[in-house]
Image (tube, rainbow, N blue to C red):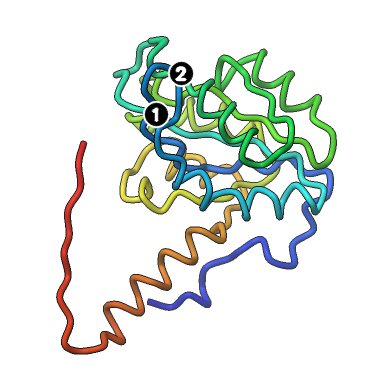
């Protein structure tokens, strides 16, 4: 695995640019409250770095499985609020991820400001990797950063489709995960056991 071939935002001039960040905000929420913020805490350094360098940060993510339909229990609003609390900085939230409302909110950002857009999966085009939906997402950014390792095995509009329309980079969390995987595969420290699992 040649990490040198992956482009990152390190050293890139992002000041004033709309940076579309594909994050993984799919965290546990109960009664409108995030019950485990570990995934958000790991995302923060990369977001803070972009913001401090004057980027206009646009965060997109899926949340749950609403199957292409709007459902209040799958809104990213409580997750955006928690991220704002953890960062100690105002983060605006927009109730759609494409269209005029999202476009206006993104274009009105000042350098350093952050916005979280609504659940990508409220649109069927996300999971279908619909080119038109991918183009709508791409219209919200000047460049694209994938910092969602755990979602990158899916060829969805926000992970694969959008990369055809914007200069694309790997985020710091993505690089960290890839390096950890590479280390485990290429430089295991015997004796080694791997326990692999998950839940949906």
Secondary element at tag 1: loop
User: Which residue is pictured at 77% across the width and 36% down the height?
Assistant: 113
Is 129 situated above or below 112?
above
Q: Nearer the viewer, residue 86 or 172?
A: 86
At which x and y percent is residue 66? 32, 18
Q: Residue at x 36, y 32 (%)?
A: 28
Q: Are marks 2 and 1 in contact (CB under 8 Å)?
A: yes
Q: Measured from the top left, where is residue 158 in percent x and y?
A: 46, 37
Quickly name the residue at label 1. 63
Q: Position of residue 76 (x, y in %)?
A: 49, 24
Q: Residue at x 45, y 42 (%)?
A: 24
Q: Nearer the viewer, residue 130 or 150?
A: 150
Q: Position of residue 58 (x, y in %)?
A: 65, 35
Looking at the rendered structure, the secondary structure element under dot 2 is: loop
Distance CA(mark 2)–CA(mark 1)? 7 Å
Q: Is residue 147 left or right of residue 62?
A: right
Disc with the residue nearer the chain's start (2 vs 1): 1
Residue 1's disc number: none
- Using a 10 Å C-alpha cutoff, classify the residue at mark 2 as few (fewer than 14 neighbours), some (14 to 19) or many (20 or more): many
As displayed, is residue 10 above or below residue 47? below
Residue under label 2: 75
Q: Residue drawn at (57%, 42%), measured in percent from left and top? A: 165
Mark 1 burial class by Cα count in 10 Å: few <14, some 14-19, many 20+: many
- From what the image shows, is residue 9 above or below residue 24? below
């Amino acid at each position: 695995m040649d990490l040198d071939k992956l482009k990152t935002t390190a050293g890139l001039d992002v000041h004033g640019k709309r940076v579309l960040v594909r994050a993984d905000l799919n965290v546990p929420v109960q009664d409108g409250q995030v019950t485990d913020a570990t995934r958000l805490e790991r995302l923060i350094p990369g977001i803070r770095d972009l913001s401090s360098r004057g980027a206009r940060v646009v965060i997109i993510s899926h949340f749950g499985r609403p199957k292409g339909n709007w459902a209040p229990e799958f809104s990213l609003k409580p997750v955006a609020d928690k991220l704002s609390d953890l960062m100690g900085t105002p983060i605006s939230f927009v109730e759609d991820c494409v269209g005029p409302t999202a476009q206006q909110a993104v274009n009105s950002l000042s350098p350093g400001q952050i916005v979280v857009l609504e659940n990508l999966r409220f649109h069927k085009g996300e999971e279908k990797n619909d080119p038109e939906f991918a183009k709508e997402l791409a219209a919200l950014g000047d460049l694209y950063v994938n910092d969602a390792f755990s979602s990158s095995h899916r060829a969805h509009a926000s992970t694969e489709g959008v990369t055809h329309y914007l200069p694309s980079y790997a985020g710091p969390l993505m690089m960290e995960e890839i390096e950890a995987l590479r280390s485990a595969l290429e430089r295991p420290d015997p004796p080694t056991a791997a326990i692999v699992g998950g839940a949906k």
